[in-house]
Image (cartoon, rainbow, N blue to C red):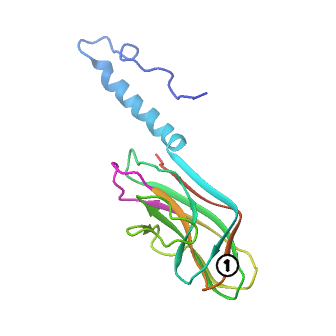
Protein backbone atom coordinates (compact mmCIF):
# COMPACT_ATOMS: atom_id res chain seq x y z
CA UNK A 1 0.00 0.00 0.00
CA UNK A 2 1.27 3.46 -0.90
CA UNK A 3 1.91 5.89 1.92
CA UNK A 4 1.59 9.63 1.57
CA UNK A 5 2.70 12.56 3.67
CA UNK A 6 -0.65 14.28 3.10
CA UNK A 7 -3.64 12.05 2.36
CA UNK A 8 -5.60 14.30 0.01
CA UNK A 9 -5.06 17.97 -0.78
CA UNK A 10 -7.93 20.21 -1.83
CA UNK A 11 -8.00 24.01 -2.07
CA UNK A 12 -11.16 24.06 0.06
CA UNK A 13 -9.33 22.49 3.00
CA UNK A 14 -6.63 25.13 2.89
CA UNK A 15 -8.79 28.15 1.98
CA UNK A 16 -8.28 31.28 4.08
CA UNK A 17 -11.90 32.39 3.69
CA UNK A 18 -10.74 35.42 1.70
CA UNK A 19 -12.25 36.16 -1.69
CA UNK A 20 -10.59 34.46 -4.67
CA UNK A 21 -8.67 31.19 -4.71
CA UNK A 22 -6.26 31.86 -1.86
CA UNK A 23 -6.02 28.14 -1.06
CA UNK A 24 -4.63 27.23 -4.51
CA UNK A 25 -1.09 28.47 -3.84
CA UNK A 26 -0.95 26.66 -0.47
CA UNK A 27 -2.14 23.42 -2.09
CA UNK A 28 0.45 23.77 -4.85
CA UNK A 29 3.19 24.36 -2.26
CA UNK A 30 2.10 21.32 -0.19
CA UNK A 31 1.97 19.12 -3.29
CA UNK A 32 5.53 20.22 -4.06
CA UNK A 33 6.59 19.13 -0.55
CA UNK A 34 4.86 15.76 -0.99
CA UNK A 35 6.59 15.30 -4.36
CA UNK A 36 9.97 16.21 -2.86
CA UNK A 37 9.57 13.66 -0.06
CA UNK A 38 8.24 10.88 -2.30
CA UNK A 39 10.66 11.24 -5.24
CA UNK A 40 13.60 9.20 -3.80
CA UNK A 41 11.25 6.34 -3.00
CA UNK A 42 9.61 6.10 -6.41
CA UNK A 43 12.25 7.16 -8.95
CA UNK A 44 15.03 4.66 -8.37
CA UNK A 45 16.47 1.47 -9.79
CA UNK A 46 19.11 -1.07 -8.90
CA UNK A 47 20.86 -4.05 -10.41
CA UNK A 48 23.07 -6.61 -8.70
CA UNK A 49 24.91 -9.88 -9.18
CA UNK A 50 26.41 -12.59 -7.01
CA UNK A 51 28.62 -14.05 -9.71
CA UNK A 52 29.25 -12.53 -13.12
CA UNK A 53 32.37 -13.40 -15.11
CA UNK A 54 33.68 -11.18 -17.91
CA UNK A 55 36.27 -12.57 -20.32
CA UNK A 56 38.61 -9.58 -20.42
CA UNK A 57 40.20 -8.32 -23.62
CA UNK A 58 42.23 -5.41 -22.20
CA UNK A 59 39.61 -2.78 -23.17
CA UNK A 60 36.64 -1.44 -21.22
CA UNK A 61 33.77 -3.94 -21.46
CA UNK A 62 30.21 -4.07 -20.15
CA UNK A 63 29.40 -6.55 -17.40
CA UNK A 64 25.82 -6.70 -18.64
CA UNK A 65 24.65 -5.64 -15.15
CA UNK A 66 22.54 -2.51 -15.41
CA UNK A 67 19.43 -0.68 -14.28
CA UNK A 68 16.14 -0.13 -16.03
CA UNK A 69 15.29 3.26 -17.51
CA UNK A 70 15.01 6.29 -15.23
CA UNK A 71 13.92 9.78 -16.18
CA UNK A 72 14.94 12.70 -13.95
CA UNK A 73 11.87 14.67 -12.95
CA UNK A 74 12.88 17.50 -10.65
CA UNK A 75 16.51 18.60 -10.82
CA UNK A 76 17.85 16.77 -13.91
CA UNK A 77 20.28 14.75 -11.79
CA UNK A 78 20.62 11.33 -10.20
CA UNK A 79 22.58 10.01 -7.25
CA UNK A 80 24.56 7.00 -8.47
CA UNK A 81 25.95 4.50 -6.00
CA UNK A 82 27.82 1.28 -6.55
CA UNK A 83 29.33 -1.34 -4.26
CA UNK A 84 31.48 -3.89 -6.00
CA UNK A 85 33.69 -6.83 -5.10
CA UNK A 86 35.80 -8.33 -7.87
CA UNK A 87 38.69 -10.70 -8.48
CA UNK A 88 40.69 -11.61 -11.54
CA UNK A 89 42.60 -14.79 -12.35
CA UNK A 90 45.88 -13.01 -13.03
CA UNK A 91 48.36 -10.48 -11.75
CA UNK A 92 47.92 -7.08 -13.30
CA UNK A 93 45.73 -4.02 -13.32
CA UNK A 94 41.93 -4.33 -13.41
CA UNK A 95 39.35 -1.55 -13.10
CA UNK A 96 35.62 -1.06 -12.49
CA UNK A 97 33.50 1.76 -13.99
CA UNK A 98 29.88 2.92 -13.94
CA UNK A 99 28.56 3.94 -17.37
CA UNK A 100 25.45 5.97 -18.25
CA UNK A 101 23.61 5.21 -21.49
CA UNK A 102 20.57 6.40 -23.39
CA UNK A 103 20.38 3.05 -25.18
CA UNK A 104 20.26 -0.57 -24.12
CA UNK A 105 22.72 -2.08 -21.64
CA UNK A 106 25.50 -3.73 -23.69
CA UNK A 107 25.77 -7.49 -23.26
CA UNK A 108 28.40 -9.05 -21.01
CA UNK A 109 31.81 -8.61 -22.67
CA UNK A 110 30.63 -6.07 -25.25
CA UNK A 111 32.18 -2.63 -25.64
CA UNK A 112 30.20 0.34 -24.28
CA UNK A 113 27.76 1.91 -26.74
CA UNK A 114 28.97 4.88 -28.76
CA UNK A 115 28.09 7.94 -26.70
CA UNK A 116 27.96 6.14 -23.33
CA UNK A 117 29.57 8.18 -20.56
CA UNK A 118 31.71 7.02 -17.65
CA UNK A 119 30.00 8.45 -14.56
CA UNK A 120 32.53 10.33 -12.47
CA UNK A 121 34.99 10.51 -15.34
CA UNK A 122 37.16 7.46 -14.58
CA UNK A 123 37.36 4.06 -12.89
CA UNK A 124 36.24 4.10 -9.26
CA UNK A 125 38.00 0.90 -8.22
CA UNK A 126 41.01 -1.03 -9.35
CA UNK A 127 44.72 -1.12 -9.85
CA UNK A 128 47.25 -3.90 -9.41
CA UNK A 129 45.69 -7.24 -8.51
CA UNK A 130 46.79 -10.61 -7.21
CA UNK A 131 45.42 -13.82 -8.70
CA UNK A 132 42.04 -14.70 -7.12
CA UNK A 133 42.18 -12.08 -4.35
CA UNK A 134 38.96 -10.12 -3.84
CA UNK A 135 39.06 -6.34 -4.00
CA UNK A 136 36.07 -4.24 -2.99
CA UNK A 137 35.12 -0.63 -3.33
CA UNK A 138 32.21 1.78 -3.18
CA UNK A 139 31.18 4.71 -5.36
CA UNK A 140 28.81 7.61 -4.76
CA UNK A 141 28.35 10.41 -7.29
CA UNK A 142 25.74 13.01 -8.18
CA UNK A 143 25.31 12.76 -11.94
CA UNK A 144 24.21 16.26 -12.96
CA UNK A 145 23.39 18.07 -16.17
CA UNK A 146 20.96 15.43 -17.41
CA UNK A 147 18.07 16.15 -19.78
CA UNK A 148 14.72 15.87 -17.99
CA UNK A 149 13.10 14.72 -21.26
CA UNK A 150 15.36 11.66 -21.68
CA UNK A 151 15.54 8.25 -20.02
CA UNK A 152 18.86 6.92 -18.76
CA UNK A 153 20.26 3.54 -17.75
CA UNK A 154 23.39 2.84 -15.69
CA UNK A 155 25.62 -0.23 -15.85
CA UNK A 156 28.82 -1.67 -14.41
CA UNK A 157 31.74 -2.07 -16.79
CA UNK A 158 35.20 -3.55 -16.31
CA UNK A 159 38.68 -3.45 -17.75
CA UNK A 160 40.96 -6.41 -17.11
CA UNK A 161 44.11 -7.99 -18.48
CA UNK A 162 43.69 -9.53 -21.94
CA UNK A 163 42.73 -13.23 -21.99
CA UNK A 164 41.85 -13.32 -18.28
CA UNK A 165 38.55 -13.57 -16.41
CA UNK A 166 37.31 -10.79 -14.15
CA UNK A 167 34.59 -11.89 -11.70
CA UNK A 168 32.06 -9.58 -10.05
CA UNK A 169 31.03 -11.32 -6.80
CA UNK A 170 29.39 -10.87 -3.37
CA UNK A 171 26.21 -8.99 -4.36
CA UNK A 172 28.01 -6.32 -6.38
CA UNK A 173 25.47 -3.67 -7.33
CA UNK A 174 24.68 -0.32 -8.89
CA UNK A 175 21.89 1.80 -7.37
CA UNK A 176 20.49 4.99 -8.92
CA UNK A 177 17.90 7.36 -7.48
CA UNK A 178 16.59 10.84 -7.85
CA UNK A 179 17.14 12.73 -4.63
CA UNK A 180 15.17 15.59 -3.27
In-image side of 129 versus 101 (left or right): right
**Residue that appears at 52% across and 58% down:** 80
Relative image position of residue 29 (x, y in whole percent): 37, 31
**Residue that appears at 52% across and 77% down:** 60
Front one among 27 and 76: 76
Quarter of the picture containing the N terminus is top right
Front one among 9 and 157: 157
- Count of numbered circles on the image: 1
Q: Is residue 25 above or below residue 175?
A: above
Front one among 110 and 10: 110
Relative image position of residue 171 (x, y in whole percent): 70, 60
- Residue 163 location, quadrant: bottom right
Relative image position of residue 129 (x, y in whole percent): 68, 84
Q: Mark 1 falls on what kind of element? A: strand
Name the residue carrying label 1.
165
- Residue 24 location, quadrant: top left
The segment highlighted magenta reads: 141-152
81 inside magenta stretch: no
In-image side of 179 versus 133 (left or right): left
Dot 1: few (<14), some (14–19), or many (≥20) neighbours within 10 Å?
some
**Residue that appears at 41% across and 30% down:** 31
Relative image position of residue 155 (x, y in whole percent): 53, 62
Q: Residue furthest left?
A: 20
Amino acid sequence: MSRSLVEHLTPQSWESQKPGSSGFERVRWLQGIVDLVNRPAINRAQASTNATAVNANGAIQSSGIGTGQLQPKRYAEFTVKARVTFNVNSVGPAYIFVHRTLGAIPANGAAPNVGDVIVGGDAFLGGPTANGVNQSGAFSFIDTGLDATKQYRYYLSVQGPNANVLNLVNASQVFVMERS
